[in-house]
Image (cartoon, helix red, strand yellow):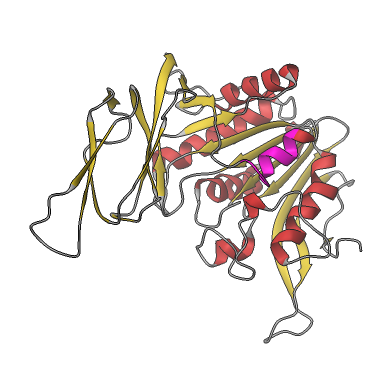
Amino acid sequence: MANPISATIDFERDGLQHGFLQIPYSRNDSAWGSIMLPITVARNGDGPGAILTGANHGDEYEGPIALHDLANTIDVDKLRGLVIIIPMMNYPAFQAAARVSPIDQLNMNRVFPGQAPGTVTQLIADYFTSTLLPMCDYVLDIHSGGKTLEFLPFAAYHELEDKTQQQACEEATLAFGAPYYLSLIEIDAGGMYDTQAESMGKVFVSTELGGGGTTSPHTAGVAKRGVHNFLVHAGILDASPLALDTPSIKLDMQQDNAYVFSQHNGLLEPCVKLGDPVKTGDLIARVYNTERTGSAPVEYTATSDGIIMGRNFPSLIKIGDFMNVIAQIIQE
């Protein structure tokens, strides 16, 4: 069965178009209803193609801000090729301010390559795999930590078997111009958009630009500048790169024990902040037993040397929750 998603715009037409990906969705209040996923397409003749996405997880906002801004300001006359802008990739999750879709409870970034027929999330992923990604050479997926995580703002690429492709991804990551950049080690790469795009030979860049389910002027600014610089690097936007406040710092997280996970439920007291340097054995957090007073907290210590790159955001933590990730500075 073919994917039932249809576009209200023409991907082959030159100029600027604002429209929708129309996703059939029969529900109690609309038997023949649709989800209308906003999309902007800008094309100027032949040239490279890029697809830019935000809100792969619906509670991450730097991408939607930067891409709404781009959709409002992009100058087609300065382009060569195709730009597809989807500020809210997982639109149902974005509308619910949730990480995963409230419709099918699926995580967009764990269902690729998608499925047709399938649920709404699976259909969106399949449409990206079968229709959108084949049009493009460059892919930028803007993430942040959402409601549960917070990160130093970084851009990332992955270790790939094709080292020529990996080098192209690293160069595009550096061009994005986040304060930090690195080769990201994923806890679980199965079903990720990243993995799908990379398997199709695309130059793929991801980010983590903050977190806590909100934004800041700094992280939104990093996203806006990064989108501009990414399109310049791709050879699609005829402009000069925007200057960085400071040079990007390269991090590495391939050491053993980079991740620290909680082994207790309770109240989290962070003892370090993002960007703090730590040595193995340094105190990084305490977890208090909230079921009784007079119980000594459990202390957690750094499992490797480096700096605190990411942290759990909520103050209540559960056993198995991510607590911190420690990265090493390898190039300033």
The residue stretch that appears in magenta:
189-198
Point 81% across, 45% down: residue: 15
Q: Quadrant of residue 33?
A: bottom right
- Quarter of the figure that contains the N terminus: bottom right
Instruction: Give the prevailing secondary structure in the magenta stretch.
Output: helix
Residue 111's spot in the image, x, y percent?
Answer: 69, 53
Q: Is residue 110 depicted above or below 187 in this figure?
A: below
* 182 relative to 41 in the view: left or right: left
- Quarter of the figure that contains the C terminus: top left
Residue 18's spot in the image, x, y percent?
Answer: 74, 55
Point 44% across, 40% down: residue: 219
Q: Judge whether residue 32 is colored magenta.
A: no
Residue 235's spot in the image, x, y percent?
Answer: 74, 24
Q: Judge whether residue 192 is colored magenta.
A: yes
* 136 relative to 277 in the view: left or right: right
**Is residue 239 visible from the viewing direction of this image?**
no
Point 84% across, 40% down: residue: 135
Residue sticking out furthest to the left? 294
